[in-house]
Image (cartoon, grey):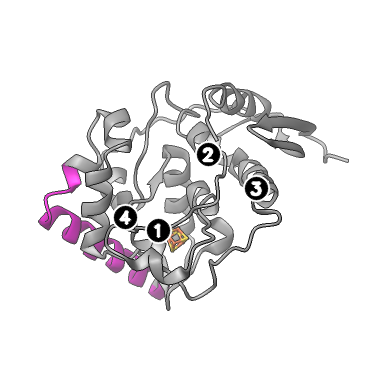
Amino acid sequence: MAETGQSTATLRLKVGDLQIAHPLTVPTRPVAATAVLPALEGLVNAVVEAAEKGKAISCRKGCGACCRQLVPISRTEGEALLALIEAMPRERRKAVRTRFAAAEAAIARAGLAERATRSDRESARSDRALSLAYFALGVPCPFLEKESCSIHPDRPLVCREYLVTSPAELCAGPAQEGVTPVPVPKLSAGARRLQDESDTWFPLALLFAWSRKRPVSAKRRPGTEWVQRFLGSLTSLKS
Ligand code: SF4
């Protein structure tokens, strides 16, 4: 049963061959979009679990090759990650911020910063040359520690959706040839339109570069309304 001030509804989702029934609990009062992120993370986890059923997943703790890819995240996830870093103990926060600064500098030196954050979002997203050039830099995600995700429970939605069945060593190849990702419906794309009308994302490694220019005002809406906006943006999803 939902606590007072919260609403629970079972979401029935059919994406491709997958059928999911998943309970979503969100606040009924006006909240920032970040307040519904835990519910969306639970939904993405459920979809991924259904998609990987019966498949031999090669991804293992300690294998962080994919954590050198360009990781597109939404404004809402960016706001949640900034709050997560802010809440870290001082020394840890300093270490994470130092890694972000190093990643940002490496991306800028390679001349990829503008290309990876340009306003022409659709073509930037499908820019394979950009993805390969970014991966070739070998810039580890600032949250990667000992080749494992140090924020695993709070990692972005798109990180949850990336699993492979091919041999792990192929993931480190320059063109990632032979890598076979599990076809997971990309619900993470829905989060990109949560606060904005357009498909808004930026590379995770440029979190602080984005935060220096980010919109200052954030709308508050009932949690149920945020979920409706999220679901509305999923209509164009392909598996
Ligand atoms: S957030 Fe975690 S899973 Fe995602 S790229 Fe970074 S280290 Fe990897």
Q: Earlier in the sequence, mark 4 or mark 1?
A: 1
The answer to whether residue 65 is above or below residue 86 is: below
Residue 228 locus on image (x, y percent): 63, 23
Q: Secondary structure at mark 2?
A: loop
Q: Earlier in the sequence, mark 2 or mark 4?
A: 2
Measured in 3D between alpha carbons, the distance from the residue under mark 1 to the one under mark 2, in whole angstroms, is: 21 Å
Q: Earlier in the sequence, mark 3 or mark 1?
A: 3
The answer to whether residue 104 is above or below residue 117 is: below
In the rendering, which numbered label is found on residue 186?
A: 2
Measured in 3D between alpha carbons, the distance from the residue under mark 4 to the one under mark 1, in whole angstroms, is: 26 Å
Q: Which residues are magenta?
A: 91-114
Residue at numbered disc 4 = 205
Residue 229 locus on image (x, y percent): 57, 23
Q: Secondary structure at mark 3?
A: helix
- Between marks 3 and 2 in the image, the one whose residue lies nearer the viewer: 3
Q: Is mark 2 within 8 Å of ligand 1?
A: no
Q: Residue at x 25, y 39 (%)?
A: 117
Question: Label 3: how many residues lie within 10 Å, few (<14), some (14-19) or many (20+)?
Answer: many
Q: What's the residue type where badge 2 is placed?
A: Lys
Residue at numbered disc 1 = 178
